[in-house]
Every structure is written in structure tokens, then in C-alpha cells.
């Protein structure tokens, strides 16, 4: 029976020769991930059933990234729960202090997730790792607790959708724009509980950073997972990082998809998602005049080196507009260090930006950039729901790092060309 890459990975981990969409399976997990919001619940359930040891100390990963550095007493207590559990279980992968980064940037960078893996995480953006050719999806804290104990999780095999991207990318367009455009096309429930497989000539040339951005936002279309068949770009990325052997899976040529969509990328401009849903997308040329109070460049969607370099290219020799706050958040300590060594921090500081340590921070309305009533932010993050970044009467617009940097300079949502020409 022909299968998609998603079906092959699930079948392998379930110990089956083949699986079909809708089939219920139990599958072994390679990585079980929790953060400072979700892991304390899982740990409570773990202890509540009398479990003594995790199934594998190398495969349970804890990353306190949402409210760290600790913003208050409650967040400090949450992180303490993770720290004590990591000590007790002698976990190999517990990141804290100067080692912590945004989980979905940190795990690929450190080689903890590799192609062919089955990964669950008690965070909806766990789907990011599909960019490596892994099956990765978010789960609830109780499912995480069960996986920490027995090393397995249950799944309903999802139907697969294929998204084919052709043509040539326009200047200032990257993976963030492709996924925003796609979500705008199919809606926030257009891939509900389906695997979103991204492919085509454009994807073949897309950088790993952009691929990670695309798969990161599969959940914003309701997807069970986002995934890209691994290739030479994947291999170049993982070979210098992978801490375990890996396997490349591919989709059979005659695999069955419930829906196939094709896009001509030459017609795609930089995208802006308007409040209060990621599907409310517009071309940058159709945005009009929208003033902005805060710009955030970072998150598990767009806090990688490619993103920071693009922002620096726009900001070089420029100043942030009066009364606008620009917050830049490198996603991991390694990215932070590299950006500093490349001189990007000097550009940011001269422009008047705030540089944050690696953290999710304002993305979920946590800290390091909360919005007041009536304020508007443009962010490279992944969600713009009501109250997502602060006051319920604030607004969040989503865009790529180039648009974000240009917006910070202009004080309104702006096309990068408006800034780099002058």
C-alpha cells in the first residue's frame, strides 16, 4: 500500500507494515517534550499514578522557556518543579539559565530531534520539527505524562494534504509569507487534524530556517502536523548536529492525499495577518496606513539567524520611529552569541531596539513586552488572537522579519522597500 511520509513514520513507530487515515494506533515516541507551563501538570500526573522513573532519561526533554527568566513568584515555582524533576530523574536534556532557549528553536539546533523521529510535546507548536522530516505534534499534559512513563502515545492517523509551491519567490518573501498565505487561503480550520505536507520547487530551495517557520504554523490551520520530505538541505543541517542516528522517509509517488493545492509563488507578496486570526491575511501593498506601538522580532517562528540578519539589513543606519518599541529576541543562546559576534547587536542598539534574552516572552502575553489597552503590535510570532499579547482591547498583526523591521522604522506597517531605498 502506498503511503505518505507521515503515514510511514507512524507505521514504523507503531510496529506496523502500513497504516491508513482514521486508524487508531499506539506508537513509540522518540522525544517527549514539556515546558514551564505544561510540564508541571504532567509531572503532577506522573507522580499521582505512582510512577517512579521516566521510560528513558535521554528522551524526556524539559525546556522552561515561556515565562523565563522568571517573571514572578508563580513562574519561579513552575520552573522549580521542572528543575527538581530533572534532578530526580537525571534527565539528559533539561535547559535552564544561560542554556535555555525557545524550545522549538533549541531542539533542532541541538540535534535532539532528528529526521524520522516521532515527537510529542505539550505545546501546540511542536509541529515545527516536521521541517526536519519528523512527525511532530502537540499533545495535552496528561498525554505527556503517560508518554514519560511508558514511552508511547496514541494517535488517530491523519489524512494528508499536499501543498505544492511553484514559481519564484519575490524579494522579501520567505517561509513565513508562504504559510501565512496558505492559512489565508484555507482558513484556520482548513487542515483540521490533517498532515500538511509542503513540497514543490520552491520548498526544494527553501532554507531550513524558513522551513521551520512554515511547519511551526501548521497548527494555525488546524493541522495535526506539518512536514517536509528531507533532502540535501536537511542533511547539511542535521549532519553537524544530530546526537542520534536518523532516517529519511519520503512519500510514495502514488500516495493518497485528501486534498492537493498548488500555489504560484511569483504572485505572493509579503503577507500581513490582521487581528484577530492568522487567516486574516493581506498583501503588504493592500494594508493601508496602520500605525504601530510595538514591534516584536523573535519567537519559535522567526527568532533564528536568517530572521535576525534580515532585520539587521533593514535597520542598518536607521532609527526606530518615535514612540515605537522594537523588541528583538534571539531564539537560543547560540543564536544570541552568533548575532552578537556578527555585529547585529550594534545595529539593533544604534537603531534604538531592546534586545531580550531567549524567551517566548511577549508572544503569549507572558512578559518582556505586554500591550496596554488600545495598543497595536506587529510581530513575527504565530498567533494574533484577542488578548494574545496583553490587553484584550489591544491588537496584534503578524508578518515576516523584514516587514517587522521596516514597520519599526516607519512607525506604521511598511513594505521593506520603503526603508531600504532611502
Image (tube, rainbow, N blue to C red):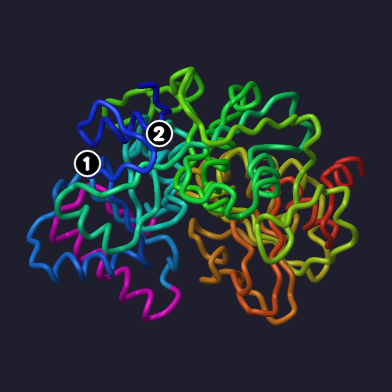
Mark 1 neighbour density, 10 Å: few (under 14) some (14–19) many (20 or more): some
* Circle 2 residue: 6
127 left or right of 346? left
- Identify the element where label 2 is drawn: helix
Q: Main secondary structure of the magenta part?
A: helix
Q: CA distance from mark 2 to mark 1?
A: 14 Å
Residue visible at 47% across and 52% down? 125
85 left or right of 272? left
Q: Is residue 87 magenta?
A: yes
* Circle 1 residue: 28
Residue visible at 22% across and 41% down? 28
- Name of the residue lying farthest toward the right: 422
- Say if residue 141 shows up in the picture: yes
Q: Position of residue 327 (x, y in %)?
A: 64, 61
Q: Within the image, what quadrant is residue 45 found in?
A: bottom left
35 left or right of 147? right
In magenta, the rendered stretch is 71-98
Quadrant of the snapshot with the C terminus: top right
Q: Position of residue 181 (x, y in %)?
A: 70, 44
- Identify the element where label 1 is drawn: strand
Amino acid at each position: 500500500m502506498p503511503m505518505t511520509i507521515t503515514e510511514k513514520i507512524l507505521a514504523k513507530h507503531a510496529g506496523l507494515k502500513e497504516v491508513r487515515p482514521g486508524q487508531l494506533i499506539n506508537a513509540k515516541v522518540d522525544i517527549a517534550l514539556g515546558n514551564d507551563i505544561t510540564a508541571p501538570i504532567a509531572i503532577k500526573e506522573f507522580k499521582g499514578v505512582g510512577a517512579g522513573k521516566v521510560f528513558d532519561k535521554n528522551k524526556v526533554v524539559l525546556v522552561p522557556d515561556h515565562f523565563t527568566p522568571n517573571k514572578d513568584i508563580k513562574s519561579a515555582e513552575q520552573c522549580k518543579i521542572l528543575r527538581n524533576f530533572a534532578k530526580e530523574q537525571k534527565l539528559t536534556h533539561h535547559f535552564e539559565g544561560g542554556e535555555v532557549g525557545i524550545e522549538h528553536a533549541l531542539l533542532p539546533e541541538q540535534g535532539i530531534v532528528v529526521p524520522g523521529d516521532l515527537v510529542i510535546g505539550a505545546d501546540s507548536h511542536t509541529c515545527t520539527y516536521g521541517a526536519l522530516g519528523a512527525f511532530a505534534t502537540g499533545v495535552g499534559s496528561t498525554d505527556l505524562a503517560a508518554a514519560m512513563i511508558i514511552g508511547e502515545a496514541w494517535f488517530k492517523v491523519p489524512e494528508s494534504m499536499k501543498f505544492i509551491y511553484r514559481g519564484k519567490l519575490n524579494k522579501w518573501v520567505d517561509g513565513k509569507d508562504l504559510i501565512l498565505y496558505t492559512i489565508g487561503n484555507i482558513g484556520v480550520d482548513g487542515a483540521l487534524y490533517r498532515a500538511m505536507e509542503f513540497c514543490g520547487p520552491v520548498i526544494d530551495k527553501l532554507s531550513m530556517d524558513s522551513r521551520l517557520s512554515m511547519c511551526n504554523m501548521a497548527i494555525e490551520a488546524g493541522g495535526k502536523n506539518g512536514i517536509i520530505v528531507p533532502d540535501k538541505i536537511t542533511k547539511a543541517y542535521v549532519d553537524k548536529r544530530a546526537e542520534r542516528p536518523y532516517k529519511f522517509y519520503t512519500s510514495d509517488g502514488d500516495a493518497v492525499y485528501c486534498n492537493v493545492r498548488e500555489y504560484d509563488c511569483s504572485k505572493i507578496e509579503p503577507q500581513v495577518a490582521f487581528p484577530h486570526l492568522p487567516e486574516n491575511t493581506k498583501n503588504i501593498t493592500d494594508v493601508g496606513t496602520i500605525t504601530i506601538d510595538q514591534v516584536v522580532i523573535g519567537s519559535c517562528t522567526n527568532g533564528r539567524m536568517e530572521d535576525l540578519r534580515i532585520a539587521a539589513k533593514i535597520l542598518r543606519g536607521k532609527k526606530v520611529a518615535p514612540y515605537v518599541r522594537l523588541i528583538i529576541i534571539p531564539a537560543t543562546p547560540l543564536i544570541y552569541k552568533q548575532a552578537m559576534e556578527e555585529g547585529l547587536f550594534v545595529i539593533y542598539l544604534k537603531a534604538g531596539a531592546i534586545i531580550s534574552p531567549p524567551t517566548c516572552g511577549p508572544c503569549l502575553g507572558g512578559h518582556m513586552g505586554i500591550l496596554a489597552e488600545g495598543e497595536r503590535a506587529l510581530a513575527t510570532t504565530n498567533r494574533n488572537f484577542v488578548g494574545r499579547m496583553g490587553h484584550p482591547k489591544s491588537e496584534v498583526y503578524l508578518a515576516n522579519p523584514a516587514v517587522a523591521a521596516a514597520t519599526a522604522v516607519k512607525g506604521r506597517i511598511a513594505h521593506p522597500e520603503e526603508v531600504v531605498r532611502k
